[in-house]
Amino acid sequence: MEIRPILSTLRRHKLTASLLTLQVALTCAIVCNTVFVTSLRMARMNLPSGLAESELVMIDSTDLASGANPLVRHQEDLAALRDIPGVKSAAAVDALPFSGNDWSNGIQTKPNEPPQLSASAFNGTPEELETLGLHLIAGRSFLPDEYIPEDSAHGYTGIDHVSATIVTRSLAKQLFPGENAVGKIIYVGAGPTTIVGIVDHLLRPSLNQPDSVERSMLFPMLPDSNDVTYVLRTAPQDREQLLKTASDVLKKLDANRVLQNAQTFTQLRNHYFQRDRTMIGLLLASMLGLLFVTALGITGLANFWVQQRHRSIGIRRAIGATRGDILRYFQTENFLIVTFGVLLGVILAVGLNLLLMKHYELPRLPLYYLPIGAVALWLLGQLAVLAPALRAAAVPPVEATRSV
Amino acid sequence: MFGYYLNLALRSLKRNPALTALMILTIAFGVAASMTTWSVFRAVSGDPIPWKSSKLFVPQIDNWGPAGHGPKDTSNEPPDAMDYTDAVALMRAHRATYQSAMYQIGAPVLPQNPGQHPITAIGEAVYGEFFPMLDVPFKYGSGWSAADDEHRAQVAVISSHLNDKAFGGGDSVGKTLNIDGHEYRVVGVLGDWNPQPQFYDVVNTGGFSAGGGNLFVPFNTAIATNMINNGNTNCVDTPKEAGFVGLQKSECVWIAFMVQLDDAAAAQRYKQFLDNYTAEQQQAGRFNWPPNNRLRDLMAWMDYEHVVPPDTRISLYVALGLLLVCLVNTTGLLLAKFLRRSSEIGVRRALGASRREIYTQFLIEAGMVGLAGGALGLVLTGFGIAGIGWVLPRDIAALAHLDVSLLITTLVVAIVATMLAGLYPALRAAAVQPAWQLKSN
């Protein structure tokens, strides 16, 4: 295909062609970055929490009787809950991934130094690991004599005396890079705490800081405030039924309490990411809209050009050009315009990404997005131009003899 | 003449009905899609008070100086809360439309019914201006007056939730409530108001908190009755005196502050006032560093405090990018159409039309496309906003409002862009001698 005649035609439609080029460029830049942002969000939504998510249900209980001993209350409640048929295990906890209730503490690896980083604390009764389904990948679980109360009545000072902790793999790596963290001493409260085990995953209660979503640690501390969350593990199909039974059992045991947020873990996760899902849907819809408009623009302009050049197409056909030549002419023309657009678009995409990185703490756009975006736009352009180009190819040679 | 041009434009547009429809549809689609997504994005982007967030500002005063920053911290940002001295000074100066210092309280509330146990109510000690500043809805009664602030009146505003718990619901205005051992008169019961993020005090709530916002009492009353701070306290040096009074005299920061400034000029003046105030403090010897203040608007503040995920804002730009591409698209199509009409212009010029008349004709034709696209876009936006309720969860859909000023801007941009697209070919064609154009045909 000879490109020079196409270029000279395009030169006569400089403004129109460059506007189409600009449109393709903008589309390329926006689509590349939108897909990137969407993929980041999706990755965040699919983070493993570390829990046996499909088997868990939770109920928050707030005891209204201020005189009662919460530790005793929790023991009684748990005993009753375990007696419900179908309950594999039960625990009282003060935090869960996605619950939003975050208690973060600064961690020092040496005493009297500024804290290196902070991590979320998860406290619960001895069955916590087993109930949540956490995977211990090194070290051991907590020993019965390591459990102490949180001491919520005195500002949660249990943290100053707790002797053991289990951390996530990610936190262990950040605290002791390249070393075995099990057996190491850290300082979270006033006293030393030994890392006795490592779990593979445990997400923080809220994922606000994207680079530290797994800075979590478990403590052998018993929740002892009036507010507590009971977690029950059961078979996936029994969850809904269990929620009802468990509420009844707790109410019957002591009516002077408020039960809230009775839900499955799946519901908790869905609720946490509701906004993200909406956002992803809208981003994808806008992106498809953008591609659609660009395709329409290409078709519209090509149609118009075909109509305008009816006579010259006829002349070309009359002097020997085949239908294929005409078809390829318009396809090549489109390819050239889209190519210019894509070249400009790649620069714009990188520029846009740099801007977003600067203002919105976004990571760098992986370079492989650019060729994929380019190919997508080439395909889109070719698809969009196909109908007008076929119409052009169908112009009969006799058109040359007709006057306009 | 105008009617004649309208007629001409209609004829010309009818000549390529498909192209005309495409142009109008593209503009309509661009306007509708960007407006709909914009309104939804804004709802999910966590702006808790979208109609007013640009007027709400959080002042920050550097009362710590260089000592307040760790050795590694090079940002030179002032603390994100205020100490008592500065908060009271800013309240006394009263330079903004509305302003309120606030701190979190957690007080035992004794319900009226005997036999019921006390409840711990989490809330805020605020000034009376807090309620009009944040457009807080009331179910019964209202907030309190400046005089109540001044005289340390024992009045309280409670949430519907606390109203249900303490009084079993109903209009409780005028009833007394025992809070922290003192009798308070209830002056207002809030309507359904639990903004998430809890933007008025993000430092203490981390933005999202289900438990707070149930009790509001006057700031001065809370201070006078020793209602201690339930939120965070940050200190560089340990207070010299013990207890709550010691905290008030210290440079520890524990008070949130918010002001309403109605326009950019007011914000500029307020920033200047802050700088003057700290310069005075420097002269008085309290600070030995130059003024280092910030005045962020609410969204920038929440951004700074990492309340809203940073990538949410990006989505807003995607919506605008869509509109931009639609406009470029239509402009390109219009240009293609108009640039072809030099011969028609030649004929009209030869028949005696002036250049001005040519411009007018083309502008009207292009404007019609823009107007039709914009109008159709409006209709589609209506459908879009109505459709949101079907697709999205109710709490998000309820937040999705149409921004009228933005809509008008979009329409004007659409019409101006199409008219510019019409003007250029007219300018070019009208510049050439009519005879030459006739000949070249």
Image (cartoon, rainbow, N blue to C red):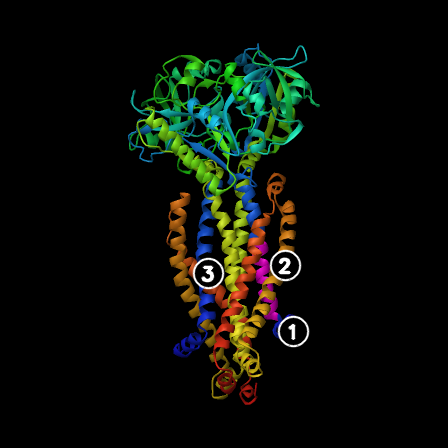
**Boundaries of the magenta span:** B18-33
Q: Is residue B187 left or right of residue A25?
A: right
- Give the CA separation, mark 1 to mark 2: 22 Å
Identify the amino acid type marked 1. Tyr
Q: Which residue is mark 2?
A: B375
Q: Which residue is mark 1?
A: B4
Q: Residue furthest right?
A: B170
Q: Chain of mark 2?
A: B
Horizontal and vertical percent position of residue A96: 50, 28
Q: Secondary structure at mark 1?
A: helix
Badges 1 and 2: C-beta atoms under 8 Å apart?
A: no
Horizontal and vertical percent position of residue A367: 37, 54
N-term mark: 1 or 2:
1
Q: Residues within 10 Å of mark 2 (few under 14, many from 20)?
A: some
> Residue B24 colored magenta?
yes
Identify the amino acid type marked 2. Ala
Q: Which residue is mark 3?
A: A376
Looking at the rendered image, the disc whose residue lies closer to the viewer, 3 or 1, is 1
Horizontal and vertical percent position of residue B114: 67, 10
Identify the amino acid type marked 3. Ala
Q: Is residue B309 above or below residue A348?
A: above
